[in-house]
Amino acid sequence: MADQREMKEKSPWHRPLIIFITVLIVLAIIALVTTAVVQNRTLQKYKYGIVLDAGSSHTAVYIYEWPAEKENNTGMVQQKHTCDVKGKGISSYYTSVEKAGLSLRDCMEEAKEKIPTWRHRETPVYLGATAGMRLLRKMNETLSDQVLSSVEGFLQVYPFMYQGARIISGQEEGAYGWITVNYLSDNFHRALPTIGALDLGGASTQITFVSRREVESPENSIHFRLYGNDYDVYTHSFLCYGKDQALKQALAQQLKPGDTQLHDPCFHRGYNQTKTWESVTGSPCVSAQGSPASPPHGNFTHLGTGNAALCRSAVRRLFNSSHCQWGRCSFNGVFQPPVEGTFGAFSAFYFVMNFLNLTSATLEDSKEKMVQYCSRPWAEVKLSYPSIKEKYLAEYCFSGTYILTLLENGYNFTSGKWSDINFIKKIGGSDAGWTLGYMLNLTNMIPAEAPDTPPLPHAGYVTIMALFSLLLTALLLLACKLFSRPACTQSKQII
Ligand SMILES: O=c1[nH]cnc2c1ncn2[C@@H]1O[C@H](COP(=O)(O)OP(=O)(O)O)[C@@H](O)[C@H]1O
Ligand SMILES: [Ca+2]
């Protein structure tokens, strides 16, 4: 006992050494944790992508962002910013094509400010044009090429990575909208049932969903393999059935040759506007359907009569159910399996139904509310909604009736299935629409096979490693204290 005390007193380095080793271990642990945290933080840097949605009525610029190291993880891409381009859609610039590109300036300047400068060079920019440009191409391919060249020339000047400006097909528009809503709902990654997508634009409308039945017509069938799962998707895009072109069709159908007045049940009583014949018959959607033998120039007076029942009858005539070469059709001889599962209805489906307060109503209630709404005098409607754009306001009676008819009589959403339709604008902060799906596809951000993911998330991994390092150190110290003393003593004795 006395020997031992003597030994301790004789080894003054014993205590400092332990202190030194302990400090080293503590420093090592701090270094370990700091490295892990710093490493994690640098990984959080974002990447960006820009998609321009060149729609028939207007162009919108979408900026997306995602954590740089999580490119292939699902649900990581989010909408950072949107910018509405002033003025009409690019197809309206066919008379002065150089202005099509210039119209994008303000929003592209905004994009330069929103995205960190050091990321500009690696940020892809895509422009996709939809039904407005499809119609212009139908009428005059040279002009539609010139409009595309104009926007292309303009976008190429920016410091971003230009990836092309093109007219996307109706199938792509439908399919990418479906990818967007299911990506944002995290349905692919979790292998959940998918939701269908209903998109209503100004010049076309799309319906896309997974059907258990065979898709009889090859042009309506798309196959996807995403995250290791197979999806057989039905899609169709009806050109000329966006709400603006549908309205032109409805007007053309009611106008008789030589008419100078049109009494329209789809517009409010007291509505009175002079319009040109050309604004109706100039559309390829109207001329294609056999336009009334009209004076090519001149005006007619558009007068509202505000009668929902008559409006409904007029709108129903736009849907032709007389022929079908398939097992079943939606309308105009287009194959469609029965609607299945839940649907997200976005774009103008949402704008119109939200304005009319019909997003949670039953089909019967919606019809009843349209009867009341359409019967309101135009002067009263204008007074009630002074801040709403007059063009939209004047058309909500038609647009609401058109949406109910398209969904019920066109796609066959019965009363029982009506609650399966969710009218949505956004999912988790990102707009529902084709643009996100388009970018995800072109940047290969949704892999066909599920990537091998580590069992723990990065932060969990770091925490567990740090905890185990601490535990191991504590155990080592304890072991040293318990077992190494006799050995130390013995070695000292030898010396
Ligand atoms: O606030 C709104 N109320 C009503 N309709 C709207 C509102 N905002 C946009 N819209 C309509 O949504 C539609 C958007 O169509 P888009 O321009 O995307 O055409 P596309 O998809 O057929 O090419 C247009 O008919 C436009 O008038
Ligand atoms: Ca659109």
Image (spheres, rainbow, N blue to C red):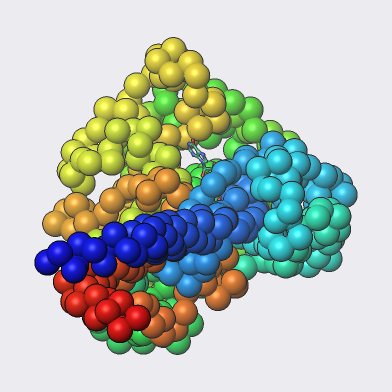
Image quadrant holding the C terminus, namely: bottom left
Between 59 and 426, which is closer to the camera in this rendering? 426
In this view of the protein, which residue sits in the foreground, 263 or 178? 178
Q: Is residue 299 left or right of residue 302?
A: right
Residue pictured at 47% horizontal, 34% vertical? 395
Whole-percent x, y for residue 204 in the image? 52, 58
Residue toward you, 181 or 213: 181
Write down the quadrant of residue 192 in the picture: bottom left
| Tally of numbered tags | 0
**Residue 464 image offset from top left, x and y in percent:** 29, 66
In the drawing, does residue 78 fall left or right of residue 29? right
Measured from the top left, where is residue 417 in percent x and y? 18, 58
Examine the rendering and report whether any part of residue 316 can be seen.
Answer: no
Residue drawn at the location 87% of the way across and 49% of the way down = 98
Left/right placement of residue 53 relative to residue 77 reads: right
Q: Which residue: 32% across, 63% down?
A: 10
Looking at the picture, how far across and down is residue 366, in whole percent?
Answer: 24, 40
Q: Is residue 47 above or below residue 476?
A: above
Asked if residue 363 shows in the view, the reply is yes
Determine the image quadrant of residue 390. top right
Relative to 271, residue 279 above or below: below
Residue at image location 52% in from the left, 72% down from the top: 445
Q: Quadrant of the N terminus?
A: bottom left
Q: In this orientation, which residue lies closer to the viewer: 183 or 269?
A: 183
Tell me the quarter of the picture where residue 344 sits: bottom left
